[in-house]
Image: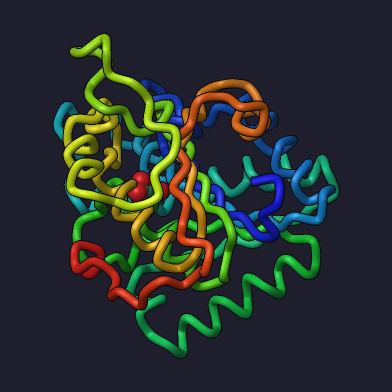
Amino acid sequence: MLSARRLILKIGSALIADSETGEIRSHWLEELIEDVVRFFERRQQVIIVTSGAVAVGSSHFNQLDRPLRIEEKQTAAAIGQVRLMLAYEQSLKRHGFSLGQVLLTGEDIDNQHRRLNARSTLQQLLKVRAVPVINENDTTATAEICFGDNDRLAARVAEMVNADALILLSNVDGLFTGDPYDKPLARLVKEVRCITPEIEAMAAHSPARHSAGGMITKLMAARIAMDAGCAMVIAKGNKPYPLAAIENGGPSTCFIPLANGRVSRAPVPTAYRR
Ligand code: GLU
């Protein structure tokens, strides 16, 4: 991470929004942005991919005691996205940075013309000291808003802008050999160099299956990132200064691509294409 020139940082809904009230966890966000600013001071570029729009906007529907329907989620996302961006903008502004909101879908990245436009916008934003903050465009997403999509979207953004590192801040320390809640002997896998069937089996039993995206989508993201020569880190985000914690040797799982970068041009897993 210390040597990465360009990093993609993915923030899950549960980190940015209080799960009961949908309120933005501003104190946590302040500390995260301090971490991000430290990277920029070291001449490392950071692009944020954030979830949380649905979680933040859902308070508009709190009279309902059933799960939100797709159109209600899209409505919640449209309302929540504005609040989310305002919170990021306020924090960034304190450090002299602007924010550039970018809404994307997997289909935008599939389309060469749109992908080139998106890439050029992201590059231009970074040039003018505006931190790109990306979310999936939930209004035009063609299928149900699927939690975990942003893990894969973040990996595809990493591939699109040739990032060196992708950090997924999650609610678990990383990939475990089993579910540590059930099996006290389960241990954290610190490094993965190849996604083998054994690693896949670990993901299926991971405690993160209880989280929004789960470990399965994180492995899909790891595959996309590693194929693009980009390292990926999974770490728990719910702590003060979560990026500093990783750099100081805190628990995490690091997926390391082969040294020669782009190892294959494997197509994006069909699961991403809805
Ligand atoms: N785009 C959704 C939101 O902002 C989240 C999707 C995801 O968590 O992967 O709420």
Q: Residue 76 location, x and y as percent?
A: 35, 46
The answer to whether residue 5 shows anywhere in this view is yes
Nearer to us in this view, 29 or 172: 172
Would you place residue 233 above or below residue 127 in this image? above
Residue 126's spot in the image, x, y percent? 73, 66
Q: Nearer the viewer, residue 263 or 77?
A: 263
Which residue ends up furthest to the top in the rendered image? 184
Q: Residue at x 63, y 22 (%)?
A: 240
Where residue 46 appears, as percent x and y from the top left, is 66, 54
Rendering quarter of residue 141: bottom left
* The residue positioned farthest toward the front in the image shown: 259
Is 242 rendered above or below residue 155?
above
Residue at image position (79%, 46%) is 93
Camera-nearest residue between 130 and 119: 119
Snapshot quadrant of residue 78 = bottom left
**Quadrant, the C terminus:** bottom left
Looking at the image, which residue is at 63% across and 70% down? 122
Indicate left or right for 251 with 6 as reference: left
Horizontal side of 163 relative to 178 (left or right) equals right
Q: Nearer the viewer, residue 250 or 27?
A: 250
- The mark total stands at 0
Placement of 242 over or under 110, stated as above or below: above
- Please report the residue visible at 71 percent of the width from the left and 36 percent of the height from the top: 35
Furthest-bottom residue in this view: 113
